[in-house]
Amino acid sequence: MSLALQLDGYRLTTADILYHRPDHPGLLQTFIWQQLDLAPRFPELRKFLAFWEEKLDGPLHTVTVASNALVKPAEFRWAECELKLH
């Protein structure tokens, strides 16, 4: 995961996608998608879901989204020195 993206506001976003199986429409299956994305609009997730609906056979049932910043401004500081062992 890119630190530069995280400093630009990208967050680790996880989507739990519940979809109907194409061969047995009465059965539901889950798919977990995880990527860095911008909350609250989630452009990467929207792009993935558009691809899903256009190219894949299993129709979507439910998408549950969770998002959390991994690097927060108060937790990040530049190091004043670097020490190497060996």
Image (cartoon, helix red, strand yellow):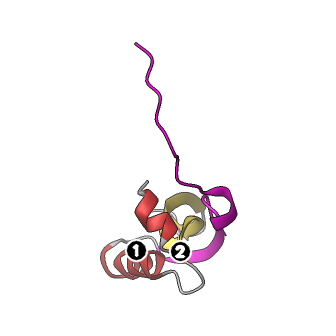
Residue pointed to by mark 1 = 48
According to the picture, the residue beneath numbered tag 2 turns out to be: 9
Task: Look at the image and give the residue range highlighted in magenta.
Answer: 59-86
The structure residue drawn at horizontal position 66% and vertical position 72%, both measured from the top left corner, is 64
Residue lying furthest front? 80
Camera-nearest residue between 11 and 44 = 11
Inspect the magenta stretch and tell me whether residue 85 lies in it.
yes
Q: Is residue 64 left or right of residue 17?
A: right
**Magenta stretch holds residue 69:** yes
Q: First in sequence, mark 1 or 2: give its number.
A: 2
**Residue 1 can be seen, yes or no:** yes
Q: Amino acid at mark 1?
A: Phe
Q: In this rendering, does residue 22 appear at all?
A: no
Q: Secondary structure at mark 2?
A: loop
Residue shown at 41%/57% (left/top)? 2
Residue 41 at x, y = what percent?
A: 54, 87
- Residue drawn at x 42%, y 63% is 4
